[in-house]
Amino acid sequence: MKTIAIISSVGGAGRTTLTAMLAGLLKAREHAVLAVECDPANVLATYCGLHEPARHGVASYASTAADTVGQAALEGDDGVLWLPWGSAGGDHGEPDVERDQHMATVLQAQPSWLRGLLGRVDLPTSGVALVDAATWPSVHAAQAIDAADLVLVVVPPRPLACATLPRLRAELKRLGKPGLYVANAVSPAAQLHIDILAMLRHALGAELSAYRIHADAGIPEALARNQNFHLSAPHSQAAHDLQGLASWLSSWAKRAANSHAHASGVAP
Amino acid sequence: MSGAASVSAMARIKATLAHQLGVDADGSRRLWLLRLLFRPPRSGQPDWAMQWSDTLAQHLHEELHIGAGEGAGVWMKRLFFRPLRRRVHLAASLHHARHHRGQQRRSMLAGRISRWLAPAYGAVGRATHAVSERLPSVPWQKVSERIDEWSFKLDRVPYVRPVVLLLALAAALAFWTTPVPLAAQFRLFVLVCLVMVVVRHIPGRWPTMLMVSLSILMAGRYIWWRTTETLRFSSAVETVFGYILYSAEFYTWIVLFLGYAQTAWPLHRKPMPLPEDRDSWPTVDVYIPTYNEPLSVVSPAVLAAKSMDWPREKLRVYVLDDGSREEFQRFAAEVGVGYLTREEHHFAKAGNINHALGLTSGEYIAIFDCDHIPTRSFLQTTMGEFLADPKCALVQTPHHFFSPDPFERNYDTFMRVPSEGSLFYGLIQDGNDFWNATFFCGSCAVIKRAPLLEVGGIAVETVTEDAHTALKMHRRGYRSAYLRIVQAAGLATESLSGLVGQRIRWARGMAQIFRVDNPWIGKGLSFFQRVCYSNAMLHFFYGFPRLIFLVMPCAYLFFGLHVFNADAVSVMAYVLPYLYVAGLANSRIQGQYRHSFWAEVYESVLAWYTVMPTTVAFINPKKGKFNVTAKGGLIEEAYLDWSTSKPYMWLLALNLAGLVAGVVRIFTVQRDEPVTVLMNMVWGLFNVAMLGAAVGVAKEAKQVRVAHHVPLRVPATLILPDGKTIACHTENYSTGGLGIVLPEPLGLKRGETLGVALQRGSMEYYFRAVVARNTEMHLGLKFEDWSYEKELQLVQCTFGRADAWVRWDEQFVRDAPLHSFIEVIEMGYQGVLRLFDAALDAIETTVLRRPRQPG
């Protein structure tokens, strides 16, 4: 199983949306897919049809009440496994501050906690775990990066994202983590987006994915209707872009799994 | 009382009769009549008589224009006096044909025939499949590689090549001249045919060589027989006509042999890489000569040339305006390219370029016709050749046309049958390249300045300055290269008269070169360079032989002249094998670039017009003037170009009269030799088909749009007003507009504003546009706030893309000689029908003084 962390250096970059859509697309490419949320925002479950914040999930594994672990993961229609943050408590699903704080302490104390958790997941070698992390820098993002074989950095075409990107890149270089940068919600109509994209291409070179995801009003619409975007609007450019990105990730995961199998002497 | 009684008696009789006949008592008269003749069917059986009568009645109603329930009087009247109604055209409309052809992409007639023969085809196909399944598969690729290896080894042994060639020549001479009885000749024919049929399915170059050799052997046998046996004539007139035919055939033999030599081994040259260090790349001037073309035609070419991938400071683009137009000067200043014009307009395009040579200084000169739009990779593809070979003075790339030429438009063969130019740029130039004899074709080429100046600039002595310039450079020992990679594309000639004008110029120019700078005379050329050049020139002398073939059957059909002194059986024994084998060999060599029998069509159309110019130029090369090829017009109304097709109508009438004469002859004077009459009539019929096709091309199909819409398929992104995106691809381009094929119907309204984004490499360009039309999946867009900058971006994302013309030829249907024959025959038939329609239209217009309603 290969782990892909999905992070960004600014909020609202579209990480969770991207995670959810890529999960479905990778599943369609015959990978076993586990989508994990490492973000106290606790919204991932919304994308798999849950109408209230998840009460069980990643946070359950660190809590003392071990009986809830069994209910932590969800399975979608298409067979994607979802592991939301799951720290909601109370009657109305409001965030459980205590649990979140406890989690933060755990994550702070054990930098490889998430990696350990994912190591316990039994997925086939071609399986992919997508980790949707909180905005970098944070303990949550650090955990996701630590667990990842590939870090997918979502870059919205905004000046702030460009300004914070070098730091993030330097950090990834320091950790020795391969990074793939994806421009998200790009509108060709906006000259600013085009210029920023040109700048990113100059700065990042081949690390910038050839697949930029076009801005599309259909994406939030699909979420609102509880639909799978690439199935509800298969002809949209954004869906084409996502298909391209998913194909790239799929072939990366297969290649990585194969080389790993060869390296460890296991017959493929 | 008695009246009432008789009425009731009648009614009773009627009811009894109705019961007996099985009709309703108040049934229609037709039903009564029918039942009088046919008994009602038993229950459960179809009522054939009824169905047949229904069909007939419906047909009569339509034909006689009678409504339901009209009385007998109307029927009687209409039987004798038909109401006036509009005449229907006999020739199939192109639109209709396209609709019917659909995905099949073949001629309609071929489609129909194959439908009839479908069961037989299926059985044969299955049998072939079953047999080929059992046969061991041969790795032809490896075999051919092995043969290559051996031949290379053998070639290294001294004296082997001349010895082998001499032996082959001796064997061939023996084969050609050995007389055998007719039966043996027939057996030889069958044997050779069998070999050809098998060999043509084997891939590779060696089987092609085998087919060519067989063709040469059979042709030689035919020539020997033809020369020794058939030139005995009984009268002086027959002798004259006989030798005229013989000389026409002699021409075709020369062209056949030279053609084999020219195209024996197409080089398929690959581009040479450029050095890494961009500082060592040379400076290039791009010349875009123009004379009277509108700016809308020229601007995309200029903008595309400007954005070719080459160091900015080493690329200079010049518009060479021979029309001295202010509009062009302003345009050049605005987009930042050079503008050159001159006071005196000597020597047309050649003079224009020579004038510019004196004012610019680039080491290399890329020349584009003003409507040829280069891709961004043009220079990087071509320039490597010069740097790798310092003696290389010329690199030529194909002329590719993205709009249909008159042949293609008027017969709807665009992107289905290779166009006339395909053969030259696909095969002949590639074959020339093997012998280092690539011609300069006036556009889409790069020339090195120094050698060009050494030969005195572009040649001005002849009207085909391009080929002549290349000839001069070859004489000086410079090399040339041909890259068969489409790196630029342009508009094809619009109308038939324009195309004819262009071909007249080429023919005249080639004849001029033949006279003033004959490739067989003078120093500096290798033997095969001379062969290639002379074949190119000889090619344009096809006018006379073609016309001779077109009228010769009439010599016999009208006057009973035996111009070919042989009985029918020996004609079959010698002519058929020669034609059949040569046809198959040529189909093998050229099939990808020209379908069988199409050369005959093209030549038939142009023959009449090239006869005079070539003859005049041959006698006096100084006569004749340059005519510019008209491009960028439009055809508002479908019409028959009477003036262009007039000679063909005479020839057609002659051949048709010949056929009638043949029928008369076969039943009256020549009852003793019916086979000869029949053979001449078949020849005449073939001529009728060719001439019909030639006339049919003159029927110009309508071309409605003002701006050219150029077929163009690149991916695009639509950004809809509601913020959604659609991935689609473009279908055509015209100045200021774009046609788009949608993946799903969107139901956009006319006038709605949306955005369309096109990509160039990793860059994306956005254009604002309004919906001009939207039918189901097709969307027409018109750009808003159009400017040169926008146009530059658009050209870069479309025509300028390096992959714009990659694999353009994959859509062609493969050549199958039989299919091709059927298609050409159908063209001829349709052509005759078109002529008939046009003639009736013309009569109607003049007699009734009423123009025909379009539609």
Image: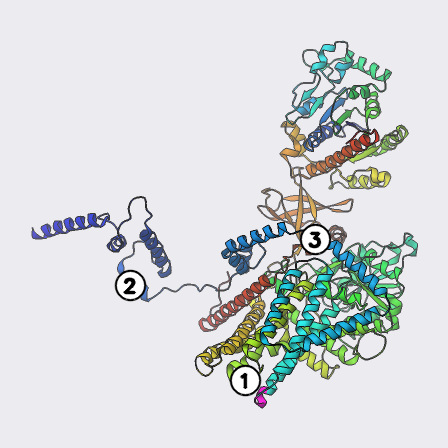
Q: Disc 3 on helix, strand or loop? A: loop
Q: Disc 1 on helix, strand or loop? A: loop
* Residue matched to label 2: B76
Q: Of residues B467 and B37, which is closer to you in this image?
A: B37
The answer to whether residue A43 is magenta is: no
User: Mark 1 or 2, which is nearer the eye?
Assistant: 1
Name the N-terminal-most of marks 1 and 3. 3
Chain letter for mark 2: B
Is A28 left, or right, of B687 in this rendering?
right
Q: Of residues B851 and A1, which is closer to you in this image?
A: A1
* Residue matched to label 3: B138
Count residues near mark 3 (Cα–Cα under 10 Å), then give few for <14, some for 14-19, many for 20+: few
Name the N-terminal-most of marks 1 and 2. 2
Name the N-terminal-most of marks 2 and 3. 2
User: Mark 1 or 3, which is nearer the eye?
Assistant: 3
- Give the prevailing secondary structure in the magenta stretch: helix
Residue B106 placement (x, y as % from top left): 58, 57
Residue B728 placement (x, y as % from top left): 66, 44
Q: Disc 2 on helix, strand or loop? A: helix
- Magenta stretch in the rendered image: B234-238
Callout 3 amino acid = Val
Count residues near mark 2 (Cα–Cα under 10 Å), then give few for <14, some for 14-19, many for 20+: few
Chain letter for mark 3: B
State the residue at coordinates (83%, 53%).
B309
- Residue B561's mark? 1
Tags 1 and 3 on a common chain: yes
In what quadrant of the picture does the C terminus of chain A appear?
top right
Image quadrant assignment for residue B763: top right
